[in-house]
Every structure is written in structure tokens, then in C-alpha cells.
Image (spheres, coloured by chain):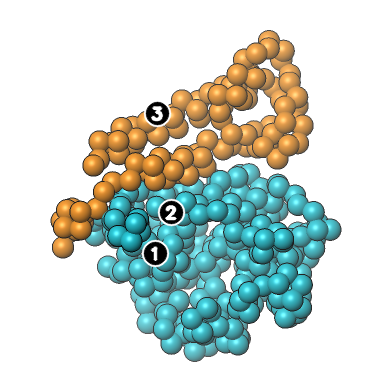
Amino acid sequence: MDIQNLIIESKARFNHNQAKQYLKDKYQSKLTFADQGGLWVSSPSLLSQLTSTNDKNLVLLDEYENPVKVDRNILLQKANEIYVSVMEQWHNEWVILEKKR
Amino acid sequence: MSKGLLLFAFNTDKTDYYKMAVTTAKRANHFLNLPVSVVTDKNTDITKYDYKFDNVIIQESDSSNTNVHKDVWINKGRYKAYDVSPYDETLLLDTDYLINSDTLLKPFELYDDFMCHNSTSFLMVNEPPEYINPHSYKTLWATVMYFKKTNKTKQLFECMKMVQENYPHYIKLHNLISGSYRNDYSLTFALRILYGQLEDTSNYIPWNLVHAGKGTVVYKNNNDTFNTEYTVIHDNWKNGKIKKEYCIISNMDFHMMNKSNFMELVDE
């Protein structure tokens, strides 16, 4: 029996909440990156902090709560590139899963 | 600096762990482009499968441990990884970890000298984090471990050896319900001992280890050798009735707790 028939025969329901959790687990690793001696997760809060000042250098707490002095522009560029690319993939996969019933 | 994977595979009457290691090694070569070495015992017929490991390391196996079903479970001796690994940087993996992406390459960029998972999630089930006991530590997972050969990691693996050799003491100390030896527990105790019972979060992989639990069945969506898309079906009990639920996952690594389901997925 192929998978599609198995789902129909067993009247299995697509679980959207679990699909959301799966996507979060999958893309969390992709948002994580190392730069300038710190470990970062590209997120709206990191991007906001990096755009909230014009200073060349900034001390930020990384994911392991170590203070790291960073070149703001370099980290911002990298964090932004990762965020845009990963969120695009996340959204594309979510759009496909959202249509399942 | 050489990098590679190390797998421990000791066959039992019920499970062909060497076959699982061959499968995991092929997937590691494909998705991670890393060499793979295997640790096994002299009873394993290493000519049975058409795959050449980077190194086959023969060690004495210890069959004194059993799992919760009282089946023999040869999981002792994981501490030997430090001494037997032929690599400067080693990714030590359980054989039932299904690689579907290059995610495992990432920690090689992130870690100093050691990393393991301290957080988990289950496909299709919301499970709370596992603790050694309600008054003890959160369990660390030995399913995926990265290490460089440094003094710290040498001490860590020596400490795991000490825990294994004195496991009855730790059963009493932490009031463990099951007497089965688990590498997860030995790692948890050893890392705590190494840090004076404190916690250093820089030893943790900053995302969840994903498990497919025993009550969940995973089906492959196509028969490609390196298939990466699966349908996960779970029986959800509600008001005394079973409601089947499913989800489709792709390009994500996960740990299969059900060994026979793992073999169904990877049989060609």
C-alpha cells in the first residue's frame, strides 16, 4: 500500500501543530551561526539590536551568554543574509504543509 | 585536522547493529562527505555487507547490560571513543540516527572541543524534557557527540569510564528506576563532575535532538537510496479512541528509537 492510500484508508488527519513544531526544529539549526568568536541565532531581536546604533563596534551577549565585541556591520550583514534565506525556505515549506488536510 | 564519524556497532541476537552502521555510514558519506570508522567486536562478520569503512576497530564487547525489555544491549564501552578514534575531530553517533541533511557539519564550525544535545523534541508528540529523576539533572544525550582530542575531553571520557565501572553507586545516588546502563546518564554525570556539578551551556548543541519515538511509525515517501522525505504517523488516544494523525517531514535528521522501523526505512 502506498503512503497516500495508507493515509486515506486509516483516515489519518494532518496535524498542523506538529508540522509547525517540525519546521521550527528543522530551521532552528539553520539560523544558528558562528561569527567573530561568538555563537548567534539570526532573529528579529538580534537584527534590531544591530540596527539600533551606528557604532562600528558593539559588545553583545552571544547564545552562550559570553560578551563578544563585534564589528557591527559584518555581523549585521551575515545575520541578515541568513535570516532572509532561511525564513524564505521556512515559509515555502509551510505554505505547502498548510494546504494538507 | 582530520574529521570523521565514529560508530559503535555490537550485534545482538535481535538486532544487526553492524547493518545499521553500514546504512548510517553510507548516508554520512553522501550527506556529510566525511569518512566513517566503526567499532565492533570479533563476532561481527564484516564481509557480509558491501561497504568499506575507513577503519574497522575491533574491541572486546561487554554483554552484561540489558534494556527495559530484558534483551541484551551492548552499549558499554562508549568511553573508549577518545582512545580509538582515528580522527582529530570526531562526530560520535548512534547507529540509529537517520542522516537526511548536512546539519551535522554545522557543529564543526561552532564548538571548542566538545558538544552534545541537552534538549530534545519528539516527532508528533509533545514530551517534556527528560530528567534523570525529578530532583536531579536534565538528561544529556549521547546520541550525537562531537569532540576534539584535548585534555578536557580526555578527562570527560575517563570520567564516563569511571561512571560505567561504578554504575550501581550512581543508580543509588540518583535514585534511578531502571538498572540498565545508559550512555546518556553516564555522559550527564561525567560532564557535571567535570564542571564541579555546575553547567556550562557551551557544551550543548544549540538546537533540539529530534526523536521518532516508539509509538510513532515512520514511512519513506519514495524508494530512492538516499530518500529524505518521510510520512510520520502517530496513534493519538482521545476519549478511549485512537485517532491517527500524520505529518510529512523532509531533509531533517532524526533519531529512530524503534530499531525495526529504522531497518524498514533503509532497506533497499
Give residue B256's position: percent from left, percent from top.
43, 63
Q: Which residue is drawn at 74% across and 76% down?
A: B172
Give how far across and how far down residue A68 sits, in percent: 75, 30
Foreground label between 3 and 1: 1
Alpha carbon distance from label 3 to label 1: 33 Å
For residue A88, which numbered disc appears in the image?
A: 3
Residue picked out by circle 2: B125
Is B150 left or right of B222, judged from the image as shown? right
Quarter of the picture containing the N terminus of chain B is bottom right
* Left or right: B225 as drawn, with respect to B59: left
Q: B126 and B16: which one is in front? A: B126
The chain under label 3 reads A
Determine the secondary structure under disc 1: loop
- In the picture, the disc for residue B141 is none
Q: Residue A4: x and y, percent?
A: 18, 53
Residue situated in front as seen by the camera: A86 or A97: A97
| For the residues bearing labels 2 and 1, Cβ distance under 8 angstroms | yes
How crowded pointer 3 is (Cα within 10 Å; few <14, some 14-19, many 20+) is rated as few
Q: Say what amino acid the circle numbered 1 marks.
A: Gly
Instruction: List the single residue furthest toward the right.
Output: B196
Give the label, 2 or 3, closer to the camera. 2
Q: Does residue A11 appear in the picture of this structure? A: yes
In this view, A28 is above or below A76? below
Q: Do the residues labelled 2 and 3 touch (CB within 8 Å)?
A: no
Badge 2 sits on which subunit? B
User: In whole angstroms, how far apart are the C-alphas of marks 2 and 1?
Assistant: 9 Å
Residue B215 disc label: 1
Q: Which chain is cyan?
A: B
Say if A18 sits above or below B18 in the image.
above
Question: Which chain corresponds to the colour orange?
Answer: A
| Extreme residue toward the front, this view | B239
Secondary element type, mark 3: helix
